[in-house]
């Protein structure tokens, strides 16, 4: 399991960028939606990226079938400046097609474009390079599929600017996976260590019942290094999988104030949903709710949702589904913390904490599930059970689950009875007090009947077939070793 998780984490940034070999768009507050706005770094011998610098006006004399042209000034084509990879927005000219094209190559001042810009001998005017002003304009270009046919795109959005949306941002073309990510000064300058998170861009809406993103292209769309918020009186979803087969990859994103941060339930579903290294707070309904196959949540803090009632802050629904949660905190939720309501599913929760829910901390509703819990802290539900099994499961296996102070008891009466067969519980730990330093610091305290019980208590003590011992903590946050690396990625020693 940990090897698989490590592979996922190491490959995640590569997946984000590997899925965007097409146009990279640049959006910033100083941009203009009439600019070229994009750059294609994968052309042969790319020139200088003009999307991140001042735009240049162009007058182009077309030749051949309109896929080649020379500059009549002032944007003289070369191998570097105004060179291959740059996008030109053609805006006027008799015989010209109003559209964006990009330069595939150039030779002796003659540019070859990816598509025809018009008819031969036409003189076309437009703008090369420069940034876009709005995200809406970029998604409209992508959904028209006019410039980057059957290719993927990455939308770079500069922070810490706030971009306000009044309608949903959608990705609709099935052949075009799209990623949207934040940067401060240069593309890629917000690292996964959170050292520059304050400079992520904020994308927000204050318009009632408006979802922020509604991808419907059944592609692995990426969301990275963003702050997404909703301040409307009537809230809606942050990311809504409208197409029934969309695969969101979400990394280092803060969600705040949505009805449901990631919604794969109400009319759609997310296929292979991955959330890593993120924060979800202040949801007014469920936090993450998915009916689609396979949900993976890693290194994520989910807290302070305000939904009262029987809904689950994290809820996996439907049938033949699976969910993996590793190093996840679900805390201070109104209602149930984690709800599994999916038949014939595999649920694996490890090195996580589900605490202080106003309903059950963990709730298993439908039969046919295989549940595995390893090194999980289930503490302090204020109006429910620690683990509540409602209907018969295939099996329940837990290793080193630490429980205590749950309002209705640590386990429901069905656990180990008719609702659960077979049951394996190994190394259960009973907590007398909270094991954490504070309600927001999930490092272990040193209290004898709290955090001290969990230090170096990870399971198994000796790995099967080996002689090495495991001294990991039974906790979502691992203690730093007394020597060795001191980097910011301290979940696994």
Image: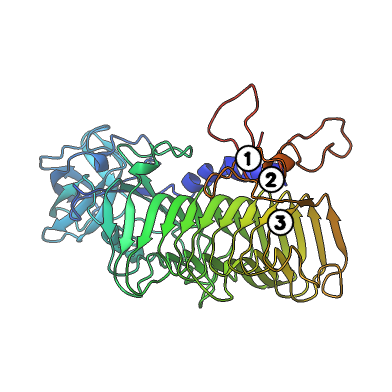
Q: Is residue 419 visible?
A: yes
Residue 329 image offset from top left, x and y in percent: 58, 53
Are there few (<14), some (14-19), or many (20+) residues within 10 Å of tag 1?
Answer: some
Pinpoint residue 2: horizontal percent, then vertical percent. Answer: 70, 43
Element under disc 1: loop
- Judged from the image, the secondary structure of the residue bearing numbered disc 3 is strand
Q: Name the residue under label 2.
A: 450
Q: Which colour scheme is used?
A: rainbow
- Tell whether label 2 touches label 1 (CB within 8 Å): yes
**Residues at marks 3 and 2, CA–CA distance in whole angstroms:** 10 Å
Q: In terms of depth relative to the viewer, which is nearer, 209 or 418?
A: 418
Q: Tell which of 58 and 156 is nearer to you.
A: 156
Residue at 58% over, 67% down: 358
The residue wearing badge 3 is: 404
The residue sitting at 76% across, 57% down in the picture is 372
Depicted 7 relative to depicted 325: above or below: above
């Amino acid at each position: 399991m940990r090897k698989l998780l490590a592979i996922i984490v190491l490959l995640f940034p590569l997946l984000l960028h590997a899925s965007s070999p097409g146009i990279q768009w640049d959006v910033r507050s100083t941009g203009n939606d009439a600019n070229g706005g994009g750059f294609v770094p994968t052309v042969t011998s790319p020139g200088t990226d003009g999307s991140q610098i001042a735009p240049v006006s162009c007058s182009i004399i077309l030749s051949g079938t309109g896929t080649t042209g020379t500059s009549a000034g002032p944007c003289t084509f070369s191998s570097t400046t105004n060179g291959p990879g740059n996008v030109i927005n053609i805006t006027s000219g008799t015989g010209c097609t109003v559209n964006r094209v990009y330069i595939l190559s150039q030779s002796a001042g003659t540019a070859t474009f990816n598509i025809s810009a018009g008819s031969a001998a036409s003189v076309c005017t437009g703008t090369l390079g420069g940034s876009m002003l709005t995200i809406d304009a970029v998604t409209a270009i992508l959904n028209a599929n006019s410039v980057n046919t059957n290719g993927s795109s990455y939308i770079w959005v500069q922070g810490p600017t706030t971009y306000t949306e009044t309608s949903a941002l959608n990705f609709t073309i099935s052949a075009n996976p799209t990623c949207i990510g934040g940067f401060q000064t240069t593309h890629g300058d917000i690292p996964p260590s959170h050292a520059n998170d304050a400079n992520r861009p904020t994308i927000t809406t204050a318009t009632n019942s408006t979802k922020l993103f509604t991808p419907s292209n059944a592609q692995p769309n990426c969301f990275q290094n963003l702050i997404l918020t909703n301040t409307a009186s009537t809230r809606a979803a942050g990311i809504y999988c409208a197409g029934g087969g969309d695969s969101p990859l979400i990394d280092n994103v803060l969600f705040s104030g949505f009805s449901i941060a990631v919604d794969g339930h109400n009319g759609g579903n997310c296929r292979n949903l991955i959330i890593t290294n993120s924060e979800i707070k202040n949801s007014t309904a469920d936090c993450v709710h998915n009916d689609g196959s396979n949900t993976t949540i890693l290194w994520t803090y989910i807290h302070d949702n305000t939904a009262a009632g029987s809904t689950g802050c994290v809820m996996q629904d439907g049938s033949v589904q699976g969910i993996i949660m590793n190093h996840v905190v679900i805390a201070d939720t109104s209602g149930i913390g984690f709800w599994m309501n999916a038949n014939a599913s595999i649920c694996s929760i490890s090195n996580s904490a589900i605490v202080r829910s106003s309903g059950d901390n963990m709730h298993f509703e439908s039969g046919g599930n295989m549940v595995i819990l390893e090194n999980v802290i289930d503490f302090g539900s204020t109006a429910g059970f620690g683990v509540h099994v409602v209907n018969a499961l295939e099996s329940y296996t837990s290793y080193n689950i630490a429980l205590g102070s749950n309002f209705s008891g640590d386990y429901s009466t069905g656990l180990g009875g008719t609702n659960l067969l077979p049951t394996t519980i190994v190394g259960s730990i009973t907590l007398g007090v909270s094991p954490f330093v504070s309600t927001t610091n999930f490092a272990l305290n040193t209290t004898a009947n709290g955090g001290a019980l969990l230090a170096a208590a990870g399971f198994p003590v000796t790995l099967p077939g080996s002689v090495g011992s495991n001294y990991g903590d039974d906790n979502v946050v691992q203690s730093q070793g007394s020597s060795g690396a001191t980097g910011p990625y301290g979940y696994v020693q």
